[in-house]
């Protein structure tokens, strides 16, 4: 069997390792991950949302498989006598839109309902009835998905890693610093420790660092780190139970235990790493947006937050999955998840495993996400709600 080298042991690298181990090639697979604590990795810093509402049928199908795996994690991802609870809870999500969002929501609703998803399209009156404490004057429609869930992302990552390790996958605590190639393939990676590792198939699962690795071999991807802060807080007043809410300003807020967490995704945010938490975003931007949405958010108790980075695909906010076609067929990338990688990890890694083992996707065709669209400059027609 070919020797498989996975670069990056986050939820994508570890999910893939688990699938490959189940396929019987654990002895031929190695994961290179420099940091077993995952301090700066995206996975432990995620919001944890596993959502059905997507603008592309393939993304919905990936989310559906994500739900399948995460909702039965302890049975599905066997970590033996040390079971991992990913804390799967159904919370529901509602997307709020205005103006041209209404047509997008209608199209998404038709596609999702046709695929069997439990989603409801609500007008303003329906929203007011559903969430009486909220102000929807600036909202024209809502897309509600009551079965959307949340999990503990760090637990999911540890679960995949433990299950993969149990089946014989080796994790090398090291970092890829250089990549050797000939005219048609990658031949080896050089590690920070000085070691050189040869292989037959190399998977770039380095997320926000994937672009740097691609550049070493001359491949350009439109994926860059984009900062995304998450804040947690309490409120003073009683509020009716409400699902995770994502509105047309990019604000996301959802109950989290006894309190709430919130964050904001905005188009055009500058690229680059910046790890310093800036609570002014909460004070000056998010809190006013929430107070505008419901008077019950007038008095909040700010409790802290953290910084993470999306591996943002500037082209179409969808991942790039598969080899560098017509150039380095054994250099496979899985990056650019743009805020969806946790929910899509089970399906993406299943697909990558099929690609490696069988030479083609078997369960779900993911070829629309290939690098070809970057080469052809044809973004995916995904107008669906962004993360
Ligand atoms: C704030 C925030 C909120 C999010 N919310 C959600 C959500 O609600 N739902 C959802 O589905 N997704 C969400 N996401 C996205 C999700 O977290 C990511 O898409 C997913 O975790 C990506 O997993 P990964 O394994 O590709 O990346 P990572 O977890 O970042 O793992 C990549 C690994 O590569 C390693 N690495 C880097 N360079 C090298 C190198 N040179 N050599 C070897 N290893 C290397 C790193 O150490 C790292 O551990 C969110 C992301 C953020 C930042």
Image (cartoon, rainbow, N blue to C red):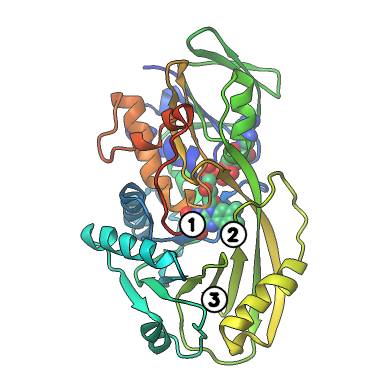
Q: Residue furthest front?
A: 99
Q: Is residue 119 visible?
A: yes
Image: 17 above or below 235: above
Looking at this view, is 59 or 342 the one in front? Answer: 59
Please tell me whether mark 3 or mark 2 is closer to you in this view: 2
Image: 341 above or below 264: above
Q: Secondary structure at mark 3?
A: loop
Q: Position of residue 49 (x, y in %)?
A: 47, 61
CB under 8 Å between callouts 3 and 2? no
Quick check: 50 left or right of 293?
left
Q: Quadrant of the N terminus?
A: top left
Quadrant of res 296: bottom right
Image: 275 above or below 294: above
Please tell me whether mark 1 or mark 3 is closer to you in this view: 1
Give the crowd class for mark 1: few <14, some 14-19, many >=20 residues within 10 Å. Answer: many
Q: Position of residue 44 (x, y in %)?
A: 58, 53
The disc label shown at residue 386, or none: 1
Q: Position of residue 19 (x, y in %)?
A: 37, 37
Image: 172 above or below 142: above
Between the C-alphas of marks 3 and 2, the distance is 22 Å
* Tag 2 residue: 265
Q: Residue at x 32, y 26 (%)?
A: 357
Between the C-alphas of marks 1 and 2, the distance is 8 Å
* Tag 3 residue: 257
Looking at this view, is 385 or 19 the one in front? Answer: 385
Q: Residue at x 29, y 33 (%)?
A: 361
Q: Position of residue 270 (x, y in %)?
A: 69, 48
């Amino acid at each position: 069997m070919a020797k498989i080298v996975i670069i990056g042991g986050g939820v994508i690298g570890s999910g893939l390792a688990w699938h490959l181990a189940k396929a019987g090639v654990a002895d031929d697979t190695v994961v290179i991950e420099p940091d077993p604590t995952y301090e700066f990795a995206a996975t432990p810093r995620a919001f944890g949302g596993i959502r059905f509402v997507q603008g592309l049928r393939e993304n919905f199908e990936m989310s559906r498989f994500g739900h399948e795996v995460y909702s039965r994690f302890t049975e599905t991802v066997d970590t033996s006598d040390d079971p991992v609870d990913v804390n799967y809870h159904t919370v529901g999500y509602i997307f709020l839109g205005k103006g041209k969002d209404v047509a997008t929501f209608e199209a998404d609703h038709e596609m999702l309902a046709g695929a069997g998803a439990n989603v409801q399209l609500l007008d303003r009156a329906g929203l007011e009835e559903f969430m009486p404490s909220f102000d929807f004057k600036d909202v024209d429609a809502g897309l509600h998905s009551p079965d959307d869930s949340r999990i503990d992302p760090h637990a999911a990552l540890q679960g995949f890693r433990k299950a993969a390790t149990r089946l014989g996958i080796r994790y090398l605590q090291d970092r890829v610093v250089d990549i050797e190639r000939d005219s048609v393939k990658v031949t080896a990676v050089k590690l920070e420790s000085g070691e050189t590792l040869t292989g037959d198939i190399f998977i770039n699962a380095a997320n926000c660092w994937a672009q740097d690795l691609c550049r070493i071999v001359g491949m350009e991807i439109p994926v860059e780190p984009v900062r995304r802060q998450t804040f947690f807080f309490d409120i003073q007043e009683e509020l009716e139970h409400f699902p995770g809410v994502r509105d047309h300003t990019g604000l996301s807020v959802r109950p989290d235990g006894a309190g709430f967490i919130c964050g904001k995704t905005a188009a055009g945010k500058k690229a680059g790493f910046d790890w310093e938490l800036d609570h002014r975003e909460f004070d000056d931007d998010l809190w006013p947006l929430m107070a505008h949405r419901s008077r019950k958010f007038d008095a909040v108790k700010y409790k802290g937050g953290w910084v993470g980075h999306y591996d943002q695909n500037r082209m179409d906010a969808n991942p790039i999955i598969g080899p560098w076609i017509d150039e380095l067929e054994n250099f496979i990338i899985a990056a650019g998840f743009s805020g969806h990688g946790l929910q899509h990890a089970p399906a993406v890694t299943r697909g990558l495993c099929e690609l490696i083992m069988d030479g083609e996707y078997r369960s779900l065709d993911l070829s629309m996400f290939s690098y070809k669209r970057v080469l052809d400059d044809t973004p995916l027609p995904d107008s669906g709600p962004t993360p």
